[in-house]
Amino acid sequence: MAAPKELGWKELAEGDVLKAGTAVEFHTGDWRSQRPVKDDKTCINCMFCYIYCPDSAIKLKDGKVESIDLDFCKGCGICHNVCPVKPVKSISMVSER
Amino acid sequence: MPQIVAKTGNEAMAEAMRQINPDVVAAYPITPATEIVMIFSQFVADGLVDTVYVPVESEHSAMSATLAASAAGARAMTGTSSQGLALMYELLPIVSALRLPIVMPEVNRALSGPINIHNDHSDTFAARDFGWLHIFSENSQEAYDNMLQAIRIAEHPKVKLPAMVTTDGFIISHCLEKIEMLDDATVKEYVGKFPAYTNLLDLKNPVTVGALDLQNYYFEHKMQVAEAMKAAKDIIVEVGKDFGRKFGREYGLFEKYKMDDAEIAIVCLGSTAGSAKAVIDEYRAKGIKIGLLKIRIYRPFPVEEIAAALEPMKAVAVVEKCDGFAAKGGPLFDEIRSALYDKKKKPLTVNYITGLGGREVTHKHIMEIFDELKAVADTGVIKELIQYKGVR
């Protein structure tokens, strides 16, 4: 695929003010060093992870936690940290290596 | 109807802000600019303006909130001085890069240290490379007029750059002078409605402001600022002429005082120009042909126009209230000399650094400068290129 044409200063938006949603095509999940893995069997759907995720990477369906969007999850571990399930948390962090 | 009133520089600027009636003002007090936002906060409390006033905890926050309000489509203003401006430095180039036309009164005060609250130009000169327009005022009248014109210039579609309008701390900011103020309705019509080029609150057309801009795009966006700064020069001239037509006081990029047949001239900014004019009048009465070029617009720097105005001189003294510690004279001296470099006939050019930390620049100092400059012109010899006038 040919690289997209890079616009010149006369063509670019002034002040770099862009149409919202620039991150949709920019997959910041590439930076992750640890990945959250959810155990569907123990998850109680408390939604703590959904509320606390700073990147809106926790995806819901029919009022339940369905998946984690790894295109945008940066692996910060907040979901793991706030998961209240005991004795083993439903979300664990595993190394990307 | 315009009214003749007695106002200090700070009062004149606060009154200009009241008449501009910005949507948001976020400010933090600092001597000698405190009064501007203090008086303005009273206007807010008295219901004389429609402004949302945000009393923030620092100048960094003041500029951050003003920036954000401007990006949200508001006509937003703040005011500061010296250390306060220094605390804003991080935000200043962001405001210009985002093309937010914030207008800010700035009262020139020496940068610490040692700590000092009096006038020199080290604070805004240090902020010269941040993509802001710099407009200097000689007195309260100019401070008032410049505030109104700055709105028209900064918000012009070809400019869209922030502007700081400065006065000399205490010398202008706290001295009571006679000024002519326009009536509220006239100013309302003159400044018009804020164009809101960027509107974060427009939910139908959501935008991203402040996106990451790396090797492949940053350069182009800085190019836009560079081009806007170039375009601003013509707009400043246009707005200054229009102001003259409408209200009887015309402004240009700089003021030439008795320059037409002058053989030697001094270049200075702010209140020093007032003293220089008095000295020039005295010398002119004795038949000595001297003149003054008073810098009004420091950014964009009107290089061709200044060079053309100074080229016919035999000798020029650049008198400035900032050192710059480059071991080669002050920042304005650098720029004036550079402006003259391409001219065939170059005047002999010397630099006087004066008035640091509020040290008074007296008529006697200016007379000495003219006398020394005349000797330079007569002999063709510069004995001392850079001098400190008034230091012990």
Image: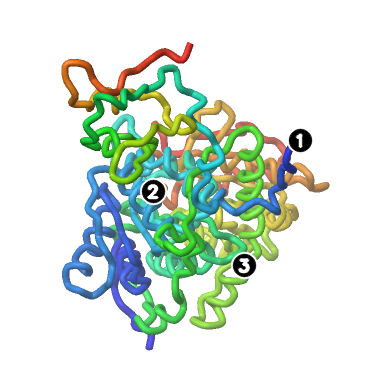
The percent coordinates of residue B217 (x first, y second) are 64, 40
Type of amino acid at the residue the image marks with label 2: Asn
- How crowded pointer 3 is (Cα within 10 Å; few <14, some 14-19, many 20+) is rated as some
Look at mark 2 in the image and give the residue it sits on.
Answer: B108
Q: CA distance from mark 1 to mark 3?
A: 50 Å
Q: Chain of mark 2?
A: B
For the C terminus of chain B, the quadrant is: top left
Secondary structure under the numbered disc 2 in the rendered image = strand
Earlier residue among tags 3 and 2: 2
Look at mark 1 in the image and give the residue it sits on.
Answer: A1
Is circle 1 on the same chain as circle 2?
no
Mark on residue B156? none
Q: Chain of mark 3?
A: B
Q: Is residue B111 above or below residue B72?
A: above
Q: Chain of mark 1?
A: A
Is B192 displayed left or right of B223 in the figure?
left
Q: Is residue B151 above or below residue B130?
A: below
The percent coordinates of residue B41 (x first, y second) are 21, 62
The residue lying toward the viewer, choosing from A93 and B90, is A93
Q: CA distance from mark 3 to mark 2?
A: 24 Å
Q: CA distance from mark 1 to mark 2?
A: 56 Å
Secondary structure under the numbered disc 1 in the rendered image = loop
